[in-house]
Image: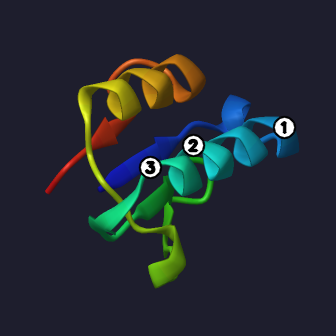
Amino acid sequence: MYMRISPKHEEPAVLAELKRLITEHGGPLPVVLYYESSQKTLGLSDQYQVKPSPELFHRIEELLGKDSVRVK
């Protein structure tokens, strides 16, 4: 699962909430964060894998903006 993080969302409070969402929805799918400002990707460790669901997608988009999450 890929999550795009725009420069305005690179704040400690937003990233802490994202971490909370990821840990609440643990599962088999690896998570990769893409930071737009530096154009870098960061693959998270296995402890931060998720189970994709419509609720998780909705909550991530509320936090990071529309079209900020994809499963590839």
x, y percent for residue 5: 55, 43
Q: Which residue is mark 2?
A: 21
On screen, residue 16 above or below 46: above
Label 2 sits on a secondary structure element that is helix
- Residue type highlighted by circle 3: His
- Residue type highlighted by circle 1: Ala
Which quadrant of the figure has residue 13? top right
CA gap between label 3 and label 1 equals: 19 Å
CA gap between label 2 and label 3 equals: 6 Å
Which residue lies most toward the left here? 72
Residue 38, which numbered label? none
Quick check: marks 2 and 3 in contact, CB under 8 Å? yes
**Closer to the eye: label 3 or 1:** 3
Q: Which residue is mark 3?
A: 25
x, y percent for residue 1: 29, 56
Name which of mark 3 and mark 1 comes first in the sequence: 1
On screen, residue 67 above or below 48: above
Q: Which residue is mark 1?
A: 13
Residue at 47%, 56% (x, y): give it. Answer: 34
x, y percent for residue 20: 66, 47
Query: By what rule are the colours in the image chosen?
Result: rainbow
Quick check: marks 2 and 1 in contact, CB under 8 Å? no
Residue at 39%, 33% (x, y): give it. Answer: 56
Q: Is 9 left or right of 52, judged from the image as shown?
A: right
Label 1 sits on a secondary structure element that is helix
- Residue type highlighted by circle 2: Leu
Residue at 34%, 39% (x, y): give it. Answer: 69
Which quadrant of the figure has residue 17? top right
x, y percent for residue 54: 25, 27
- Badge 2: how crowded within 10 Å, few (<14), some, or many (20+)? some
